[in-house]
């Protein structure tokens, strides 16, 4: 049985806890958070031992896996700490706000013969996998254009308001847009060019980026609006012989010959409390990571060069929008 420790028992940890509970070869043996109420609740739910300090947990427990759900700015240091003790690591996105951390973390994983993976969930999200399959197979002809959207309200729930601190969260590009951008780089490769438009104020931030690829382009938008605006994640892709759309948690394909095919609903969807659509993406990513650990294989579905490329593009979005 693989012994799993989790650190950062806030919003997203609920989806990870549920996923681990569905993995028969692994068990959460310890949980860690600096907030007593969070760690108590997580310990009661999972049966894991409660800790308030990561170093203490890593020293006291002989973990096989550390699952990091900490605020973004703490991911890379926590990952390196665990890897240096020979513990396999899965961390929530993003790996870091700094590109240099990608090599630092992967070098630690290699030096200590450990598996490491960033949980870029869209790579494991059924409706996005269907889109990649359509592109790779050419089933509907060539891709001509695409649109990806991820918008919501400015977060007010995070611990110590870390999400609204640019130094700790990187704001909208790292919180929301990174999902779509990471998927694009994974599915379609590195874009050849991009154009950025952004409307940023102290409590709100909205931007659009058009990414150009040979033969097609993808328009994207990401925003935190300072209102009660509800979260939306969607895509719409135009192929030569069909349009694929993902909206309100449902994926539909409109073939040129007419009609509409709906992708069947995900069985045993991991419904969570953080306003995201029902999906098994969190289970799928943790299942894949566990399989890599068990097989002693690198997590090739999330590669370091792709992570670096995403961080380079976000850096460009920030620089270009500041220049305008
Ligand atoms: N994949 C997704 O769909 C998705 C969705 C939401 C968040 N995330 C990512 O997950 C991460 C966490 O986000 P969240 O929404 O759960 O944030 P959150 O603020 O709800 O939770 C973070 C938790 O970490 C704890 N913490 C802070 N410092 C700590 C420390 N030094 N040691 C131990 N615990 C500490 C806080 O008390 C809090 O409980 C972020 O990096 C975010 O980008 C991913």
Image (tube, rainbow, N blue to C red):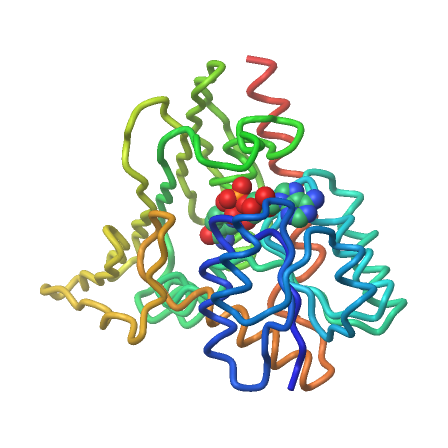
**x then y, percent, for residue 316:** 63, 30
Q: Residue at x 78, y 48 (%)?
A: 77
Q: Residue at x 63, y 73 (%)?
A: 29
Closest to the observer: 254 or 89? 89
**x then y, percent, for residue 157:** 44, 35
Q: In what quadrant of the picture does the C terminus appear? A: top right
Q: In what quadrant of the picture does the N terminus appear? A: bottom right
Q: Look at the image and tell me whether residue 309 can be seen.
A: no
User: Does residue 39 appear left or right of residue 130 in this picture?
Assistant: right
User: Does residue 181 appear left or right of residue 263 in this picture?
Assistant: right
| As drawn, 1 above or below 27 | below
Determine the residue located farthest toward the right in the rendered image.
111
**x then y, percent, for residue 101:** 78, 46
| As drawn, 181 above or below 137 | above
Q: Residue at x 83, y 52 (%)?
A: 104
Closest to the observer: 54 or 222? 54
Determine the residue located farthest toward the left in the rendered image.
259
Q: Residue at x 51, y 80 (%)?
A: 23
Q: Look at the image and tell me whether residue 269 can be seen.
A: yes
Closest to the observer: 124 or 169? 169
| As drawn, 219 above or below 242 | above
Q: Quadrant of residue 289?
A: bottom right
Please give the count of numbered marks on the rendered protein. Answer: 0
User: Does residue 296 appear left or right of residue 222 in this picture?
Assistant: right
Q: Quadrant of residue 135?
A: bottom left
**x then y, percent, for residue 238:** 30, 52
């Amino acid at each position: 049985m693989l012994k799993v420790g989790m650190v950062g028992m806030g919003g997203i940890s609920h989806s990870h806890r549920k996923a681990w509970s569905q993995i028969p070869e692994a068990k959460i043996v310890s949980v860690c958070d600096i907030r007593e109420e969070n760690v108590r609740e997580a310990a009661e739910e999972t049966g894991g031992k409660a800790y308030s300090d990561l170093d203490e947990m890593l020293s006291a427990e002989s973990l096989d896996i550390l699952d990091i759900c900490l605020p973004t700015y703490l991911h890379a240091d926590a990952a390196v700490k665990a890897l240096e003790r020979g513990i396999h690591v899965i961390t929530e996105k993003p790996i870091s706000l700094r590109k240099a951390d990608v090599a630092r973390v992967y070098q630690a994983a290699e030096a200590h013969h450990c598996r490491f993976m960033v949980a870029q969930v869209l790579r494991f999200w059924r409706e996005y996998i269907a889109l990649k399959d359509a592109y790779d197979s050419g089933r509907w002809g060539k891709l001509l254009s695409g649109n990806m959207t991820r918008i919501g309200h400015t977060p007010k729930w995070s611990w110590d308001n870390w999400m609204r601190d640019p130094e700790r969260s990187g704001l909208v590009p790292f919180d929301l847009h990174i999902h779509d951008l990471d998927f694009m780089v994974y599915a379609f490769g590195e874009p050849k060019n991009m154009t950025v438009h952004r409307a940023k104020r102290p409590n709100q931030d909205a931007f659009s980026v058009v990414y150009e690829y040979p033969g097609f382009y993808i328009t994207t938008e990401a925003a935190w609006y300072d209102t009660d605006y509800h979260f939306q994640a969607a895509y719409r892709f135009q192929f030569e012989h069909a349009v694929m759309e993902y909206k309100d948690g449902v994926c539909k394909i409109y073939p040129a010959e007419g009609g509409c095919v709906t992708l069947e609903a995900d069985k045993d969807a991991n419904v969570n409390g953080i306003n995201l659509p029902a999906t098994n993406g969190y289970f799928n990513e943790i299942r894949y990571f566990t399989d890599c650990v068990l097989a002693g294989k690198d997590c090739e579905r999330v590669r370091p060069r792709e992570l670096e490329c995403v961080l380079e593009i976000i850096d460009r979005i920030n620089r270009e929008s500041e220049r305008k």
